[in-house]
Amino acid sequence: MRAVWFVAAGLLALFAAGLWVRFANTRRARRMNMGGAITVLDIDRDRITVSGLRNTPITIDLAQIHKVAFFKRDLMTVDLICCEIGFTDDEGAGLLILDEEMARFDDVAEWLKALPGFQEDWFLTVFAPAFEENYTVAFEKSA
């Protein structure tokens, strides 16, 4: 009987350790974006400046954005709403992914509403149902 108890306790410990590693890796990964932590430095009417995407801070103009999508990441107990911004600048194509826990996320989401044809009700589509990705393209520039 003791052997069964030890086996069950061992399996439970392995399961808990596996969940902890997944949780820790998810939290670490979401704070990193394309090799560095993203920080929104400045937002004005036509452009946004971010650091952490490349070696130096970059400025992205509204006209350079070709796609904006919102989605959720399942973090086991909560969802994390993310914004994916595809853009093209002098150095080529880039992808910026921000999440709702980053400073100024709401400011960026508001700033994106200036894009022509932007789907302003994206939150209703992404928010529910819970623990689903709900990938929603809120803006896509026509070719």
Image (cartoon, rainbow, N blue to C red):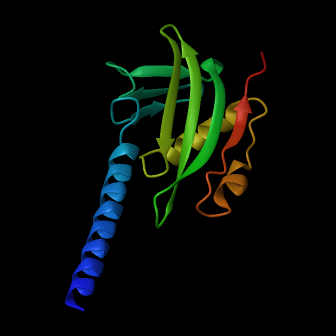
Q: Quadrant of residue 15?
A: bottom left
Which of these two is toward me, 73 or 127? 73
Q: Quadrant of residue 55?
A: top left
Residue in view at x 79 percent, y 33 percent:
117
Residue 65: x %, y % from top left: 62, 23
Q: Look at the image and tell me in which quarter the N terminus lies.
A: bottom left
116 with respect to 86 (left or right) = right
Q: Look at the image and tell me in which quarter the C terminus lies.
A: top right
Residue 53: x %, y % from top left: 39, 26
95 with respect to 113 (left or right) = left
User: Is 15 situated above or below 125?
Assistant: below
Residue in view at x 46 percent, y 58 percent:
75
Q: Quadrant of residue 40?
A: top left
Residue 127: x %, y % from top left: 65, 58
Name the outermost residue toward the bottom.
Answer: 1
User: Is 135 situated above or below 35?
Assistant: below
Which of these two is toward me, 8 or 85? 8
User: Is 91 situated above or below 106?
Assistant: above
Q: How many marks?
A: 0
Residue in view at x 37 percent, y 22 percent:
57
Name the outermost residue toward the top.
Answer: 90
Which of these two is toward me, 70 or 26? 26
Residue in view at x 30 percent, y 72 percent:
11
